[in-house]
Image: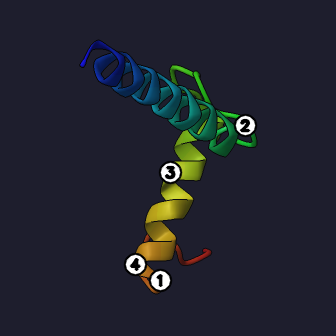
Amino acid sequence: MQQIVVYFILACAIGYAAWWVYQRLQKANDPCEGCDGCQLKELKEHAKQCKKQKKSSCCTKK
């Protein structure tokens, strides 16, 4: 019974470590990872919103 519990805890720890590494690799190409905020991050967020709304007035060039 103790071995089953140990194997279960080990499997959970390995699964969590794999998930953590996967999350870090997904964000590796993001230049704003860990940034508190700047104009570049605000522009990126604005661009994301514009893509969602497509032909919104916020995206039209003047």
Label 3, label 1: how far apart the Cα atoms are: 14 Å
* Residue hosting label 3: 45
Q: Which mark is residue 28?
A: 2
Give the total of numbered labels. 4
Sooner in the amino-acid sequence: mark 3 or mark 1: 3
Please provide percent x and percent y for residue 30. 69, 41
* Residue hosting label 4: 53
Name the residue at 61% across, 75% down: 61
Q: Residues within 10 Å of mark 4 (few under 14, many from 20)?
A: few
Q: Are marks 1 and 4 in contact (CB under 8 Å)?
A: yes
Please provide percent x and percent y for residue 7. 41, 24
* Residue hosting label 1: 54
Name the residue at 44% across, 64% down: 49
Q: Nearer the viewer, mark 4 or mark 2?
A: 2
Name the residue at 61% across, 40% down: 22
Label 3: element kind: helix
Sooner in the amino-acid sequence: mark 4 or mark 2: 2
The vertical placement of 60 against 22, above or below, is: below
Sooner in the amino-acid sequence: mark 4 or mark 3: 3
Label 1, label 4: how far apart the Cα atoms are: 4 Å
Label 1: element kind: loop
Sooner in the amino-acid sequence: mark 1 or mark 2: 2
In the image, is 33 to the left or to the right of 36? right
Screen quadrant of the C terminus: bottom right
Q: Are marks 4 and 2 in contact (CB under 8 Å)?
A: no
Please provide percent x and percent y for residue 58. 44, 69
Label 4, label 3: how far apart the Cα atoms are: 13 Å
Amino acid at pointer 2: Ala
The vertical placement of 51 against 10, above or below, is: below
